Image (cartoon, rainbow, N blue to C red):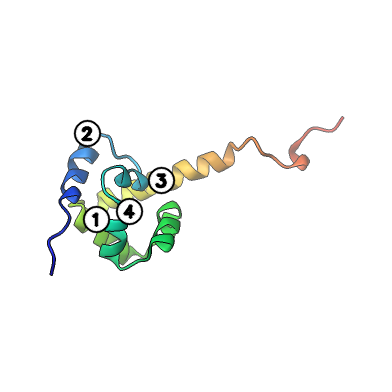
């Protein structure tokens, strides 16, 4: 079995410093291709999952947490923040339908 990529070691310190706040932020410090390979996922599918984090299984999130030296609670907080951020952007989207426009 191969050694885990050393870049995983930087994730926990970056989380503690507040530089990682969402699940997606992990990939500023660790290559997506490395994590995808470690999970046994193909690149395009993994890209989809990191932007739709709710589609990961709990087991997959636990594996990523372990690789990054994060607790389950820390990983779930990153997922929660990403989901909240995405939902708040959807709710405040400037592209509203014509039904939302005042008549007149």
Residue 17, numbered label: 2
- Write down the residue under mark 3: 82
Which label's residue is closer to the chain start, 3 or 4?
Answer: 4
Q: Mark 3 and mark 2: span between their CA atoms?
A: 18 Å
Q: Mark 3 and mark 1: span between their CA atoms?
A: 15 Å
Front-most of 71 and 45? Answer: 45
Residue 2, numbered label: none
Which label's residue is closer to the chain start, 3 or 1?
Answer: 1
Front-most of 2 and 97? Answer: 2
Image coords of residue 13 (percent x, y): 18, 40
Q: Residue at x 45, y 44 (%)?
A: 84
- Write down the residue under mark 4: 32
Q: The C terminus appears in which quarter of the rendering?
A: top right
Which label's residue is closer to the chain start, 2 or 1?
Answer: 2
Which label's residue is closer to the chain start, 3 or 2?
Answer: 2
Using the image, determine if residue 77 lies above or below residue 14: below
Which label's residue is closer to the chain start, 4 or 2?
Answer: 2
Q: Classify mark 2: residues with Cα within 10 Å, few (<14), some (14-19) or many (20+).
A: few
């Amino acid at each position: 079995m191969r050694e885990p990529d050393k870049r995983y070691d930087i994730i926990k310190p970056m989380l503690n410093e507040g530089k990682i706040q969402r699940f997606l932020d992990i990939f500023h410090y660790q290559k997506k291709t490395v994590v995808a390979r470690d999970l046994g996922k193909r690149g395009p599918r993994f890209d989809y999952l990191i932007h739709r984090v709710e589609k990961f299984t709990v087991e997959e999130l636990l594996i990523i947490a372990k690789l990054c030296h994060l607790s389950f609670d820390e990983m779930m907080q990153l997922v929660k923040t990403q989901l909240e951020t995405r939902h708040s952007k959807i709710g405040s989207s400037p592209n509203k339908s014509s039904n939302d426009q005042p008549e007149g």
